[in-house]
Amino acid sequence: MKTATASGITETYIRKTPSSAKRYAEAREIFPSGVTHDTRYLRPHPVYIDRAEGTRKWDIDGNCYVDYFGGHGALLLGHGHPEVVEAVRRQPTVEGVGWLPKGFFVLFL
């Protein structure tokens, strides 16, 4: 049985995330470190998430991850909890508040 090494894990990550590598190269032209927050930086490149539901996230290459980090408040109920999504959808539209694709909520300041 072969023992996993850091280089073996890194090689597998690179092989399974080519779209994230490409997106990172593009992002480095826009953001100083290629990411919008320090905790999103990973070597050799960060993973770019396409969607999330419950405890899972999927990257732009289709790989599924369990979200142990639980960022952005998802730790409480998971990503996209149906009751929370429905409660937000029922809220009246207010000036300065907008919706992004796939139900992401944003407040414009």
Image: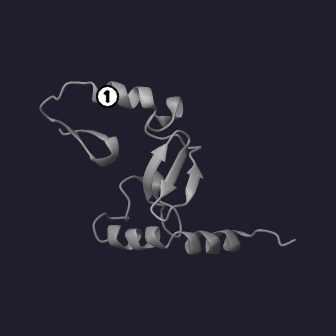
Quarter containing the N terminus: bottom right
Q: What residue do we see at 46% from left, 55% from top?
A: 40
Which quadrant: the C terminus? top left
x, y percentage for residue 10?
A: 62, 71
Count of marks, rendered view: 1
Residue at 20 percent of width and 39 percent of height: 98
Q: Which residue occupies 48% across, 36% down?
A: 74
Mark 1, residue position:
88
Q: Is residue 23 left or right of residue 4?
A: left
Amino acid carrying label 1: it is Val
Residue 92's image quarter?
top left
Considering only vertical position in the picture, is 49 above or below 108?
A: below
Tell me which colouring the rendered structure shows: one colour
The extreme left residue here reads: 95
Dot 1 alpha-carbon crowd within 10 angstroms: few under 14, some 14 to 19, many 20 or more: few
Residue 18 lies, in percent from the top left, at 49, 73
**Quarter of the view holding residue 106:** top left
Instruction: Judge left or right: residue 108 versus residue 52.
Output: left
Residue lying furthest right in this view? 1
The residue closer to the viewer here, 52 or 22, is: 52
- Seen from the viewer's position, the closer of residues 4 and 90 is 90
Which of the 4 image quadrants contains residue 15?
bottom right
* Image coords of residue 60 (percent x, y): 45, 62
**43 and 47: which is toward the camera:** 47
Element type where label 1 sits in the image: helix
Q: Position of residue 90 (x, y in %)?
A: 27, 25
